[in-house]
Image (tube, rainbow, N blue to C red):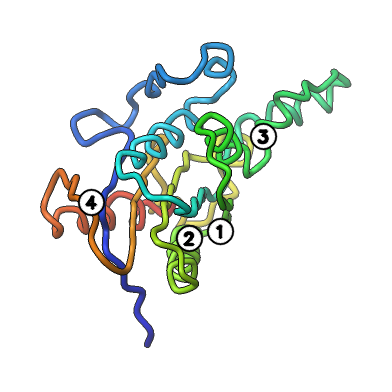
C-alpha cells in the first residue's frame, strides 16, 4: 500500500474553530467592492483561506481548488432562469463554472502560476491529495490546496447518497493547507504539528468535501 507523505507548513479554515459553522461569509476587505458583491458566500470562504496561505512566500507553488459541487446554488438559479426564458447574465454564468474561484484568485492576486480545479464525487478530497502529491513529486517547491463545499441545495439535495449525507458539511466550509516535501520554511504554525494534522483530517477529509 502506498502512502502520501508531505510536510504541512501552514493551514487555514473558514469558519475558524472559534465561530459556529453557519457564520457569515468572511469580509474580504482586500477585494474591490464591485467584485466582492458578485462572489457567493461559499466563494468568499474559499478565497479567504487561499489568501491566508499567502503568508508564506514561495514562488511557483501550484494551487489546487477542489470542491465536490462548486457553486451549485448559482447554477440552479441560472437553470431556473433558463426554464423561464429569461436572459442569462454572462457574469453569473462565468462565476458558476467549476474553476471560477481559482480564476478569481489568480486575477485578484496577480498569480500567473499553475492552478487547477478538481471534482471527484465522494472522493474529491482524496483526489486533491493525490494531485498535490503528484505535483510535489514532479518538482513543485510547495503546493497550496483549498477544499471548499456546502450542502446540496434543493431540488438536488435528495440525490446525495447515504454516505455523502452522513459526511457532508452542515454548512459551507473551506479548508486550506500549504504542503511541501523538502526543507522547512520559516514557521508560521499556530498549533503543534499533531494539532495541524488533526485539524486537517477533522476539517475536510471527514467532511466528505
- Identify the residue position indicated by label 4 in the image: 199
Q: Are marks 3 and 2 in contact (CB under 8 Å)?
A: no
Q: Earlier in the sequence, mark 1 or mark 2?
A: 1
Q: Residue at x 62, y 37 (%)?
A: 100
- Identify the residue position indicated by label 3 in the image: 96
- Identify the residue position indicated by label 1 in the image: 121
Residue 128 numbered tag: 2
Q: Secondary structure at mark 1?
A: helix
Residue 138 numbered tag: none
Q: Secondary structure at mark 4?
A: helix
Q: Residue at x 15, y 58 (%)?
A: 193
Seen from the viewer's position, the closer of residues 199 and 35 is 35
In 3D space, how far apart are the residues under numbered discs 1 and 3 (Cα atoms)?
18 Å
Q: Quadrant of the N terminus?
A: bottom left
Residue 39 position (above or below residue 99): above
In 3D space, how far apart are the residues under numbered discs 4 and 1 (Cα atoms)?
22 Å
In 3D space, how far apart are the residues under numbered discs 1 and 2 (Cα atoms)?
11 Å
Residue 3 position (above or below residue 200): below
- How crowded pointer 4 is (Cα within 10 Å; few <14, some 14-19, many 20+) is rated as some
Q: Residue at x 52, y 56 (%)?
A: 161
Front disc: 1 or 2: 2
Amino acid at each position: 500500500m502506498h502512502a502520501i507523505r508531505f510536510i504541512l507548513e501552514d493551514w487555514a479554515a473558514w469558519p475558524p474553530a472559534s465561530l459556529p459553522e453557519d457564520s457569515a461569509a468572511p469580509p474580504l476587505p482586500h477585494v474591490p467592492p464591485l467584485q466582492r458583491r458578485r462572489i457567493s458566500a461559499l466563494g468568499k470562504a474559499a478565497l479567504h483561506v487561499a489568501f491566508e496561505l499567502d503568508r508564506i512566500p514561495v514562488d511557483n507553488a501550484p494551487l489546487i481548488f477542489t470542491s465536490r459541487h462548486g457553486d451549485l446554488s448559482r447554477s440552479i438559479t441560472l437553470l431556473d432562469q433558463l426554464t423561464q426564458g429569461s436572459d442569462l447574465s454572462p457574469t453569473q454564468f462565468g462565476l458558476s463554472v467549476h474553476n471560477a474561484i481559482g480564476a478569481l484568485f489568480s486575477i485578484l492576486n496577480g498569480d500567473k502560476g499553475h492552478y487547477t480545479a478538481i471534482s471527484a464525487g465522494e472522493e474529491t478530497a482524496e483526489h486533491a491529495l493525490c494531485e498535490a502529491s503528484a505535483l510535489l513529486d514532479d518538482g513543485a517547491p510547495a503546493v497550496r490546496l483549498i477544499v471548499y463545499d456546502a450542502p446540496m441545495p434543493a431540488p438536488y439535495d435528495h440525490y446525495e447518497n447515504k454516505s455523502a449525507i452522513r459526511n457532508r458539511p452542515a454548512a459551507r466550509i473551506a479548508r486550506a493547507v500549504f504542503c511541501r516535501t523538502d526543507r522547512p520554511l520559516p514557521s508560521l504554525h499556530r498549533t503543534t504539528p499533531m494539532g495541524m494534522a488533526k485539524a486537517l483530517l477533522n476539517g475536510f477529509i471527514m467532511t466528505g468535501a
